[in-house]
Image (cartoon, rainbow, N blue to C red):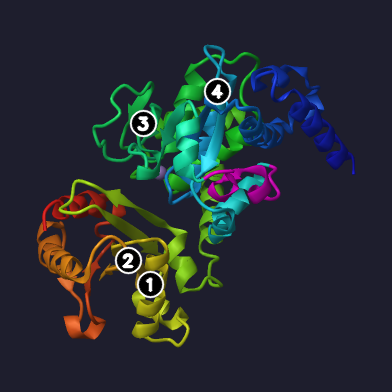
Amino acid sequence: MLFSTIVAAAFFSHAAFASTIPYQHTFANHDAHINEFDFYDWCIASKAAFLESFKTGGTKEWTLVMGNEAADTDSMVSALGMAYHLSHRKKNPVKAVALLQVDSMALGFRPENVLVMKNAGLQDPTKELLTLDQLPWHRAKVAQMVQGLVLTDHNRPLSFWQNVPVLGIVDHHEDRGINMTAQPRMIEMIGSATSLVSSLILDEPYTEGTIPKELADLLFSTIAFDTNGLKKKKTHKRDLKSAKGMFELSSFAGQDMYKVAKNKKKHMKKAEADIGHLNVTQLLARDYKGDMIYNSTKPIMVGITNVPYAMADLIAKSSNGTEEAVAHETRAWAAKNEIDILLTLTKKKHSDGSKTREVLLFTKHGSHLNSEDTERMYHHVRDKLPKELPLDFKPWHNESYWGHQRFAWKQHGEGAGRKIIRPILDKVLQEW
Ligand SMILES: [Mn+2]
């Protein structure tokens, strides 16, 4: 009761001021108790104020901060951290809001996200955070209405956001060499994009105090998750430095940092695996990244999705437990999302500790290509992709097994993931 009264009071006072004063000033006026809820207040208030700006015509003042469209924990938390940072830093604070590039119904496909948000005091992220489906207009139109974008956890905006100024980039993927004027333009291939955002937070002074504990908890937990509990192999120098810095600001300060990191990772991994209830379509959508590419023979929608099961398990989850049913569900989902070519990457850890990955190639005509073009593109990718890919990437069954315009490969070991395969696929698709 007391909790909700305080939160409600804090929320309404923010909301009332939201359109006239920037958020960084609200920070100072709380007593110690209400400060605990500032992260929650800010999430709700920044979302409300941004949506309100569509009514008042003030959208041009806003910067959209976005992670990538897979909306994993790193994408979500790095965007939240960066938006908070941009609106609270001492030097040149701006109106910034984090936008998650998924629909609200898809948030539940990643229970690990729901868990970290809950630990940070958010009870229902679909209400407290801004998702694509909550924008009052299609994103292509919203793109033209805002001041610009800050990208976290990716460095090339999706084609929907074309021609919008990219004001900043904080990322740990391969540098696509675009948006060179972004400031900051921080691209380092380290464990977590969140480590880069944390660096900025730790290096720049704030108007008042520092970030809320809940946000430090989120940033620390995400670094821990992305580095497998601060394991040496995955943790770069900056990851460790940021983890240490965030740990000091977090509610875990004073404990054993490595122990907490291991614990956070363990709980998040456990939550992440709790997706037994998802069906084939939801599993395809859960960790999908895709976009139009224009430097191809014809413009096409290209996507790669990660499924954390073996193909056999995915097949078992289909409506009648057959390859055909998976193909049918894939085709329907691809059609809805206008995907021309899709790679499904499966992943399986066996009881003896060994790992295998299967790669299923799927093409479909009707969205941007006619059937002849699709056939040509399919054969080109089927023949060229395995030659370009590193590691042992062996055909899995023959073509007739998978059906028309479908092909699969299998590789042993962790092998190449999406980060490695995507640039190679783009290269293969330049000319076909
Ligand atoms: Mn990431």
Q: Check the image and report above or below for 187 versus 430.
A: above
Q: Which residues are magenta?
A: 121-137
Q: Is 130 contained in the magenta span?
A: yes
How far from the left and from the top, in percent, is residue 331?
36, 73
- Of circles 4 and 3, the one toward us is 4
Name the residue beneath numbered marker 2. 344
**Left or right position of 116 against 178:** right
Name the residue beneath numbered marker 3. 237
Q: Are marks 1 and 3 in contact (CB under 8 Å)?
A: no
In which image quadrant can residue 418 be found? bottom left
- Of circles 3 and 2, the one toward us is 2
Quick one: label 4 or label 2, which is nearer the N terminus?
Answer: 4
Q: Residue at x 54, y 44 (%)?
A: 137
Q: Amino acid at mark 1?
A: Thr
How far from the left and from the top, in percent, is residue 386?
14, 63
In which image quadrant can residue 186 be found? top left
Q: Amino acid at mark 4?
A: Glu
Q: Are marks 2 and 1 in contact (CB under 8 Å)?
A: yes
Where disc 1 sits, the SS reads: helix
Q: CA distance from mark 3 to mark 2?
A: 33 Å
Name the residue beneath numbered marker 1. 330
Q: Is mark 2 within 8 Å of ligand 1?
A: no
Q: CA distance from mark 1 to mark 4?
A: 41 Å
Where disc 2 sits, the SS reads: strand
Q: Which mark is residue 61?
A: 4
- Of circles 2 and 1, the one toward us is 1
Q: Is 123 contained in the magenta span?
A: yes
Q: Residue at x 84, y 41 (%)?
A: 4
Q: Amino acid at mark 2?
A: Thr
- Of circles 4 and 2, the one toward us is 4
- Of circles 1 and 3, the one toward us is 1
